[in-house]
Image (spheres, rainbow, N blue to C red):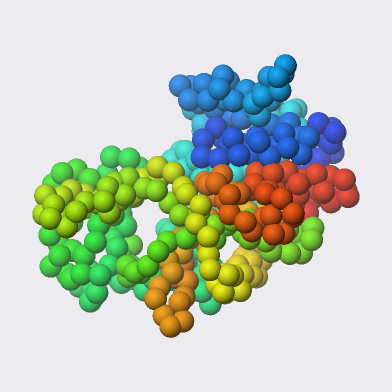
Amino acid sequence: MKEYVDRALARYDRSALALCSIGSHSALEIAFGARAQGLRSLIVTAQGRERTYTEHFIRREAPARGCVDAVLELGTFSDVLDDGVQQHLLAANAIFVANRSFEVYLHQKYSYDEIERRMLVPFFGNRHLLRAEERDEAANQYALLERAGIRYPRQYATPNDIDRLVMVKAPHAKVSFERAFFLASSPAEYRTAASRLIEDGTLTEQGLGGAVIEEYALGPSVNLNFFYSPLLGELELSGTDTRRQTNLEGFRNVPPSALEAVRAVPMRMEEAGHIAATLTESQLEQAFALGERFVEAARLAAAPGIIGPFALQCVIVAGPPKEFVVYDVSLRIPGSPGTRYTPYSAYRWGRDVSVGERIAMEVVLARDTNRLSEVLT
């Protein structure tokens, strides 16, 4: 893949680099960061999803406002791999920043091998690690966590092994890129819940056959949003947050007296937003140790390893001592722009720095020191 980067950089006008992303998930965060550091931004949208970028946040002057410099509208997100689109992005001096929407929408049509091969535009980050988020890939996030010696929820091979409260994660029957979730504490509870969800069309028998059954870790959830800089050789904690999810938040607010009324309602954990959530300072060293071990494991698994942002999504379980249990991993920009409202980037840089701006800072530093090839794949 190095030839992609070398070929593109040989043609690029390095004074006019543009950070490019799929118009969803965290595209505005990337556009904001580009503007903050004097770079351009280019957002790729799909029909019917463009107004956020073409109207509400497009860059205008007198007075200066907005952060999106240019928008490329496609029929569908997966059209981004078409040869003509790739050539357009290369002509725009694009540096692509992958987000979760990029993976989700393209992987519905293409394998990861095809995505890696057909994406000619240089990635900020390691394109070879994106597939590790998928649990059905051989070198997935569990393999990385195992290599790093990081605790993750115990997994169960079959429903008959369930001996405590577990979370069951299976492909949603109607929304292919989402998962359906349910809780069970015994094989009998599993069968009852699964049958109900199959009957109402949330699950299929085939999807249930590939479900992940894992121990339900009890504690508050927190996302550790890290940034690894190959240029500085340092790991940073960009910020910490927690998720707001439908309809899980609703369940949490149901009074005990009304629990019976929602017992048969399937649990959904669709992303609705994020809120800032700080750690106690005594936990920071343990958090950094997790991040450092994960960076090393990723380097050994898929050189050059992690470049830029990644997140370890954790539950903090009771002690003593309190411990992080990592239940999910994000190997690209996280979905929360609110991490700047935690103090950790300011402790490091003297001011709040968002994840999008931190990406742009790394690109600018690489450009100005002639080291772009070290942060692109």
The image quarter in which residue 37 lies: top right
Relative to 183, does residue 163 appear above or below in the rendering? below
**Quick check: can you spot residue 261?**
yes
Farthest residue, direction top: 62
Where does residue 211 sit, x and y in percent of width and height?
30, 59
Where does residue 269 sit, x and y in percent of width and height?
34, 49
Of 350 and 180, which appears nearest the observer?
A: 350
Answer left or right for 22 relative to 323: right
Residue shown at the point (28%, 40%) measured from the top left = 174
Relative to 363, does residue 257 appear above or below in the rendering? below
Residue shown at the point (56%, 19%) measured from the top left = 55
Answer left or right for 209 relative to 272: left
Where does residue 52 sit, x and y in percent of width and height?
53, 25
Farthest residue, direction right: 369
**Quick check: can you spot residue 6?**
no
Relative to 215, does residue 239 appear above or below in the rendering? above
Of 155 and 277, which appears nearest the observer?
A: 277
Farthest residue, direction bottom: 320
Residue shown at the point (40%, 64%) measured from the top left = 220
